[in-house]
Image (spheres, grey):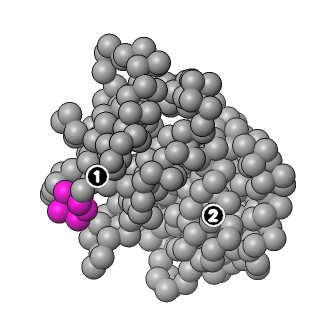
Amino acid sequence: MSTLCVPSQVPPVSDDCEQLHKAFKGWGTNEGLIISILGHRNAAQRKVIQKTYAETYGEDLLKVLDKELSSDFERIVKLWALDPPVRDAQLANEATKRWTKSNQVLVEIACTRSSQDLLLAKQAYHALYKKSLEEDVAYHTTGDFRKLLVPLVSTYRYEGDEVNMTIAKSEAKILHQKIGEKAYTDDDLIRILATRSKTQINATLNHYKNEFGKDINKDLKADPKDEFLALLRSTIKCLNFPEKYFEKSLRLAINKTGTDEGALTRVVATRAEVDMKTIKECFEKRNTVPLDKAIVKDTTGDYEKMLLALIGHGDA
């Protein structure tokens, strides 16, 4: 469900590299040229461009982008240019260095990626930071947050479609009981969310709703100001309805007084090649305005153009 607009006839990689090299030369950078190339190449193509650029010009393309670009435009181009596992590793590392809100980013990476993608991100983390994501998350979090986040980033979920309805029913009961007791950090509750396959969790949560008449996240809104409960709700949304989670992230990023460029950049850069088409549909349904219009209203210049290119707006 990617929205990325890649031309059917992509020029030879040497041409792309030559054009990018030209974009950095002379007076000022040609941002339009950078968008027209990098904004319309998929992950595999971008990887080859980086390799060829380094071989041809003896420079790391990411370092050149770092030197030539600035502010939000620089951030989105650089995030987008990265190989997805490296991008996730960098985002996770940034998140471990900050507090509270960034825990959402860790949940996002742990729960919306496939098991294989999460594993690749963790391997990239080892290579980049000479330690594991698990140890950094454990070191930088405490208490309830640590109890939830460490198992989430440590997991390797089964990806198949098999569902055990007996388990779904019994675990729906456990979840309902623990939430009723406000035992939000109960070992069983965390075990279910951190280890079961997404298909199995989906069956469990459907049974929860049918049996107890309420969506689990409604029951987890007992204290809307409780940050741990907010993180639990995000975990469930990321596992069950990632597109709804990302729609809400975009809505909050855009509809605030002052745009949250960090969240807007991260969601567009990480989802453009995954499920942006579905996210855009969710966004329009929920906000009665298309995502591209909301972005145009809230952003400007090259940053806006790059965002529009990535969400597949016309021939941006």
Q: Which residue is mark 2?
A: 94
Where the N terminus falls, by quadrant?
top left
Q: Is residue 32 left or right of residue 268?
A: left
Kind of residue sitting beneath label 1: Asp
Given contact means CB atoms under 8 Å apart, are the residues at marks 1 and 2 in contact? no
Q: Is residue 8 above or below residue 62?
A: above
Residue 173 placement (x, y as % from top left): 63, 61
Q: Is residue 291 left or right of residue 113?
A: left
User: What is the quadrant of residue 32 in the picture?
Assistant: top left
Q: Which mark is residue 157?
A: none
Residue sitting at 34 percent across and 25 percent down? Answer: 6
Residues drawn in magenta: 296-300
Looking at the image, is mark 1 or mark 2 earlier in the sequence? Answer: 2
User: From this viewpoint, is residue 2 visible?
Assistant: no
Q: Position of residue 276 (x, y in %)?
A: 36, 42
In the depicted structure, whether residue 22 falls above or below residue 261: above
Label 1 to label 2: alpha-carbon separation: 24 Å
Q: Which mark is residue 302?
A: 1
Residue 253 position, x and y percent, is: 35, 67
Q: Tell me the SS state at disc 2.
A: helix
Please give left or right for residue 285 compared with residue 84 in the image: left
Which numbered disc, 1 or 2, marks the residue closer to the eye? 1
Q: How many neighbours does mark 1 have within 10 angstroms: few (below 14), some (14-19), or many (20 or more)?
A: some
Q: Quadrant of the C terminus?
A: top left
Q: Position of residue 148 (x, y in %)?
A: 71, 66
At 27% from the left edge and 70% from the top edge, which residue is drawn?
255
Residue 293 appears in the picture as rendered: yes
Seen at 56% across and 56% down, the residue is 108
Magenta span dominant secondary structure: helix
